[in-house]
Structures are given as C-alpha cells and as structure tokens.
Image (cartoon, grey):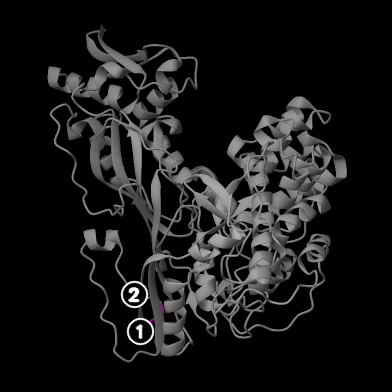
Amino acid sequence: METVEMNSVSLKRPHSEDDVASADEIKRQKILEKPKAGNTSGQSIETVTEQPEDTKNEIIPNEESEEQEEEELEDSDEDGDPESFADMMKHGLTESDVGITKFVSSHKGFSGILKERYSDFVVHEIGKDGRVSHLDDFSVPVDDEDPSEETFTVLSDEDKQRLEELQLFKNKETSVAIEVIEDTKEKRTVIHQAVKSLFPGLETKTEDRDGKKYIIAYHAAGKKALANPRKHSWPKSRGSYCHFVLYKENKDTMDAINVLSKFLRVKPNIFSYMGTKDKRAITVQEIAVLRITAQRLAHLNKCLMNFKLGNFSYKNHPLKLGELQGNHFTVVLRNITGTDDQIEQAMHSLREIGFINYYGMQRFGTTAVPTYQIGRAILQNNWNEVMDLILKPRPGAEKGYLVKCREEWAKTKDPAAALKKLPVKRCVEGQLLRGLLKYGMKNIISAFGIIPRNNRLMYIHSYQSYVWNNMVSKRIEEYGLRAVPGDLILKGATAVHIEEGDVDNYTIHDVVMPLPGFDVIYPKHKIGEAYKEMLVADNLDINNMRHKIRDYSLSGAYRKIIIRPQNVNWEIVAYDDPKIPLFTTDLDKLEGKPLPVLPTDGKFRALKMEFSLPPSTYATMAIREVLKMDTSIKNQTQLNTTWLR
C-alpha cells in the first residue's frame, strides 16, 4: 500500500534502558550477527548502526479508521494517564525488532518536533502523467442536463429518511408517497428529479389521491438497481466518470469513500482511486466515481467536515490502483536543535544519497502482537496460532472494549460471548469472531476468510516486509553502499545478477532485494543464504512459497534498497508561536487565508522540507534518515508523554 504515515512526533534526548530481547529478536540475531569477514565494501560513505544519543522521537499511534458513526466510540478511550500509556507502550515494537537498524549518512542527528497538526504534514498525489494533484477550483462544469439547485432542498429530512429506507430495502414498504404542497407542474418535476438523482435505483410517478397530488417513489429493477446507477438518466455525450480532487484531513482514503458513499446513498465500489492515503495527514488525491454528477459532489462541500471536493471533470475511464508516480510531501519539523551546517549536511545527504527503503513501523502494527507474526503463522498453515494471535489478551495500549473482548475469549473460548463485549464489529477481531460463530471452531480457515481479503493479505505482506528489512540491514552491514557481484538489478521487469565484470556499471541506487516468494531469485552472495536461514528458522521453505490456499501463496517482488527522493527543497524558518501554520495549504489558498507574518529572529526554528517519493515508500523513513531517530512508538512514549497532558 502506498503510504503516508507520519504521526505526531516529539524528538527528545533518550534515557538509557535495558531491554530483554524477544524470541524473534534472538532468533534473528543468530542469523544477522554472524562474524563478518574483513570489510571489502570500499564504501566512501559511512554506514551508521547505532542511534545517536540525542535523536529519539515520540509518535502518537495511528488509529484504525471506522465508519463515521463509530468514531465517537472508538475515540472515547484515547484519553488517559500519560504515565500509564507510556508504561503500556513498553510492550510495543522497536525499529530493531523489525530489522530497521542502519543509516546511510554520516551527519550528526538533531532533534525536532512534528506536532499533532495536520497542516505540518501534507501529501499531494503525483499522477502517472507527472502532474501533482492540487485542489484549486470549486467550480462545476456547466451542463444543461444537471438538475436545478432546488433539487437538493425540495425534499424534507423526513422524506429523505423514508426514501433512503426504501432504497436500501430497510423496511417492507414497496413505495413511498410524497405529497406535493403548492402543486404546480414545475414543483412536481423538481421532486421527480430530486428522487431520481439523490436515490439511484428508485423511479417515480404522479398519482391523484383524494384530490391531492402525490409523487410515488418505487423500485424500478429490484435490488440490482442500487448497485447499478440508472444508465438511461446519464447523457451519452458526457463521460461516464466524474473525476475530482479530494482534499481530506484526518481520514484515510477508504474511510473517506465510505463517508462520501453514505452521503450520496450509493455503494462504495463505484469509486476508484490510484492510491490509498493514510489518516494522519492532510492529503490531496484524485478520485473517480461512476455516474454521479459534479453538481451532486460539489453539494457535499456544504455538509462534510474535513473534506473538500473540487477540480471536477467528466472522463470515460475510472482510475486504477497503482497508476501513479508517487507523492509529494511537505513536512514541517518544529523546534529543531541542529545547527545550520548540520541541517544542510543532512538535507544534502537526503538529496544526493537518499535513505534506506525500509518498510516503516506502521507496516507491523502498534500492539504487542506484530502483524508479521500472524502472517508467519498463516504461511506455516498454523491456524490455531493465527486465531490465538488475533484474539488473545495482550499487554499494551488498546481500546477498553477490545481488552474486555480478549479477556472474555481467554476465559470462555466462546465467540458469541466475546462478540457481545465488542460494540465495534468491523474490526478484525469482530470479523473473526463472527466467522467462528458461523463456521465453528474446527473450521478456522473459513472463519478467517470472513475478514476482507486485503486485510488478510496485509498479514503475510507484513511478514515479507519483516524479512526484507532484516535482509537489507544485513546487506548493508556486509557490503556497504556500493554494488557488488551477486547483487540483483532490474532489466525491465526482470531481475538479473551483477557479474564481476559489470560491477562498475552499477551503483547502490540500482540494487534491488527480493521479498520472498516462488517467483523471485535471490542474491548470489552471503545474503542469498541468509534469506534461506531466516525462513528455515521460521519453519518455512524458501523453495516452496506456494500455499494450499491460493490467496496465501507468495509470488514475491523486488524493491530498491536505497531511494533518492526527487524535488528535494528545504528552508529554515524562525517563529514565536508554536500553533501558527508555517505554510499555506490548498484550502487556505482557496479561502484566501494569508500566511502569518513570521519574525526574522524568532524564539524557535523549524525545518520546512519538501520531497517526492515513489509509491509504496515510507516518508517516515526519509525523515528518520534526516534526524537520525527511532520511529517506533515503544521507544518514544517512554521518553516524554507530555503530549497527552
């Protein structure tokens, strides 16, 4: 998944602590810490393993998004005593737990703060044509076929409620009658248009009842009508898809689409997009929707919080996942401590060398049970362990109702009893419990299959990422930052090994490493063997990555080990007020909000940085390289929890 994943960060000087290595860590170290032969890398750039003493951070955990009506329930448990939260987060993961141990630059790290301000972390999608998405136009394309503005106001709230229940088959009524007050032909026409445009799948007719005119709404084509917007109502001259730019704050893409579909009263699957954007940011991206007018979409700007829609156009095609060049990031790091020279060195290194393309901490979950462990159990075909890992009680920060659900499960092993403790049923735990209730405890595979496919695959992809991170750290430890014989590079879509005679033709920026699978090859040096050893330690066979359930068969993929960001720019800004914005967003510009006047010699300094990254690359890992910080929640919440006060 394409990732925008920076949460609130407060970077502080760390305290020393003694951590007990987990079983996974011990097993991994046996593979990764074998004595190394003399350094033959010849690298001219220092690789740094240890975290500098003054560069740790604090990150507020990202939350899973639920439907709008569940958000209050989800958020109700967020507040609490800072010390108890920090204590609970001791059970989380550190970067080293998931193989993130190296830096490529030699500069000294420095501290800074990325506050819980969405305006300090902004993401603009870059389309396949290289165009950066911006929200800069609220106008609606002129179209004679569009209904009048009165269409959106002629129906009462009660009428809309009854029509929605009819549309969604929520009651036994076969029709809804709407009395025409102040009857005129024009008024009846507007009501007909309103019902048909706002409630796809319903048709209307006019009837006389007791001397009064009524508009009767009814289903035209059974339940299929809801999923398929009426073809006959869409002008042939207009493109079938309305493309628009979605500006959103504090919502991930799927959550945003669920909200839009709810307000439009349509199924979410008529929307398409090129990439998913995470919750903790302001993000700007292109969306396409089938046979919904720009006028209807623009009307949502009046009633939705944290969303704005604009830049409307009609086209004949939807959007496809992955059809983008990447994302452009604008990030403000506040209250920085580094000298101007340190900052210049760090940013030049980011621009010229780049950063290790690790999978970020978000890939592995925020609780004491990492997602990669569940993925490993799936690949091992150990379904009892899969069930146990998802449902068992765990230390750490979790919603109160999840804690109660887990306790009930541990006590009774009764899916129905555990489910009663869970008011939010859309979470993975609720879905698995419903599956166990339906299929029984002896058919865990089918029960697990109730979880949406993307969520299930997330677990095994997390395991692949865990292996990849560990192997890349070992690759850099063994051979440094230059291409060596036996490394892999891509020629087109095909991976080939670098031969001894060709090694001078390639740099570290050409080298890729495989995610394990049945359709990849491995390096022809020590790292190839390290892959096999790591999987053997996990009771897996690297030569047999096919699973008896096709969905869980891993074909593998290749990923560049070093990413050099494009369009890297930065400036140091002075300011006095920690709460003022330090740059303007698209929405600020549309609303004419001026940038606050900043002092030339303020109390604080901030680093404003911009850069572009390809898809599936973690911005957190780029910022980690600049600041030399550990991005794990575990390390940081123990250092300073004043953000919770």
**How would you rate the neighbour count of disc 1 (Cα within 10 Å): few for under 14, some for 14-19, many for 20 or more?**
many
In the image, residue 321 lies at what x, y percent? 44, 40
**How would you rate the neighbour count of disc 2 (Cα within 10 Å): few for under 14, some for 14-19, many for 20 or more?**
many
Residue 450 appearing in the image: no
Label 2, secondary structure: give it: loop
In the image, residue 560 lies at what x, y percent? 53, 57
Residue 274, magenta (yes or no)? no
- Vertical side of 16 occupied by 458: above or below: above
Q: Is residue 310 left or right of residue 415?
A: left
Residue 451 appearing in the image: yes
- Residue stretch in magenta: 574-578
Q: What secondary structure is the stretch in magenta mostly built from?
A: loop
Q: Is residue 279 left or right of residue 569?
A: right
In the image, residue 117 lies at what x, y percent? 44, 68
Residue 577, magenta (yes or no)? yes
Label 1, secondary structure: give it: strand
Whether tag 2 and tag 1 are in contact, CB under 8 A, the answer is yes
Image quarter where the C terminus lies is bottom right
Q: What distance separates the C-alpha of mark 2 from that of mark 1?
A: 8 Å
Total residue callouts: 2
Residue at the far right in the pictured view = 411
- Which numbered disc, 2 or 1, marks the residue that appears first in the sequence? 1
In the image, residue 525 lies at what x, y percent? 69, 59
Q: Is residue 30 left or right of residue 333?
A: right
- The amino acid type of the residue labelled 2 equals Leu
Q: Residue at x 36, y 34 (%)?
A: 264
Residue marked by disc 2 = 582
**Residue 611 in which image quadrant:** bottom left
- The amino acid type of the residue labelled 1 equals Tyr
Viewer-proximal residue, 283 or 66?
A: 283
Residue marked by disc 1 = 575
